[in-house]
Image: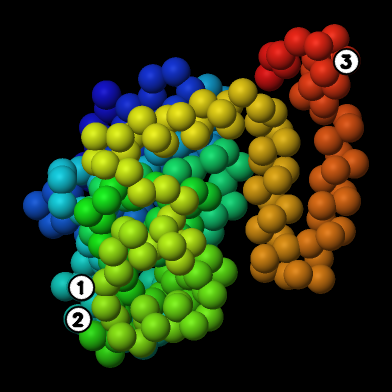
Amino acid sequence: MEQSTNFLIDIPNHTAYLTINRPAKLNALNRATLVELSSILQRLKDDKQVRGIILTGAGDKAFVAGADIAEFRDLSEDDARELAAWGHREVMDVLYNFPKPVIAAINGFALGGGLELALACHIRVANDTAKMGLPEVSLGLIPGYGGTQRLPQLVGRGKALEMMLTGEMISAADALQWGLVNYVVAQEELLSTCEQLLKKIYAKSSTAAAAAISAVNIGLAKPEDGYQAEIHAFGAAFSTADFEEGVSAFLEKRKPNF
């Protein structure tokens, strides 16, 4: 187990367990935490031993309860734009486009920037007491780390606007029904459920997984480019070692060794 200023990092086998470790602040995302997260993500991206990430929060109350609002007080309009642009570029978009699967294990409140962090992950699993919301309107703000774009992709325009315009939290059960999370489980099953999902993914081709993530993201961002991205990635797969192994294993009636 490795401990940095705001994170606990544990990498047994091929999974990086990344825990935001600010329980006294309900794991709120201040600038220092985001800077640290950006650096950790780059390191995990380059680590060939790491095949996936489980991202969660320390303690039993919150995944991430939001941004650190105290840091907002003295920001100018230009400062705020730069903060949002930096957060998109260095953290949220990095997670969203990460070439290895990232699962958010939502162990409590996921509000504001915390929910946006979970939205940037590929898969979300919540415990049954989790609460999720985008309460920025209560501060005279709107989400600034991708919430206005990524939430409608998951739950649709109507439900997304309901959450953003009322600022109210929703339950884990509603989040599951709306498509915001993939699974809702008891707290004691939260990490094991994430682990089982990654186990299934690890049994498949990592190069194909990265290509699928990329093609899906391109199609969501630019629908007119999505099919061409798929065609290109499909063709490129034929020159990979994983394709050779996968087809050989299929024809030889054995499990592939990716």
Q: Nearer the viewer, residue 189 or 35?
A: 189
Classify mark 2: residues with Cα within 10 Å, few (<14), some (14-19) or many (20+). few
Residue drawn 82% across and 26% down? Answer: 243
Expressed as whole percent of the image width and height from the top left, the position of residue 13 reads 44, 18
**Which mark identifies residue 73?**
2
- 90 up-or-down from 194: above or below: below
Q: Classify residue 241 as left or right of residue 164.
A: right
Q: What element carries label 2?
A: loop
Q: What's the distance in space between the residues labelled 1 and 2, CA to CA?
A: 7 Å
Question: What residue is shown at x 71% (from left), y 14% (from top)?
Answer: 255
Q: In which quarter of the image is the N terminus?
A: top left
Q: Quadrant of residue 82?
A: bottom left
| Observer-nearest of 180 and 20 | 180
The residue at which mark 1 appears reads as: 69
Amino acid under disc 1:
Ile
- Numbered label attached to residue 251: 3
Amino acid type, mark 3: Leu
Quarter of the figure with residue 7: top left
| Structural distance between the alpha carbons of marks 2 and 3 | 63 Å
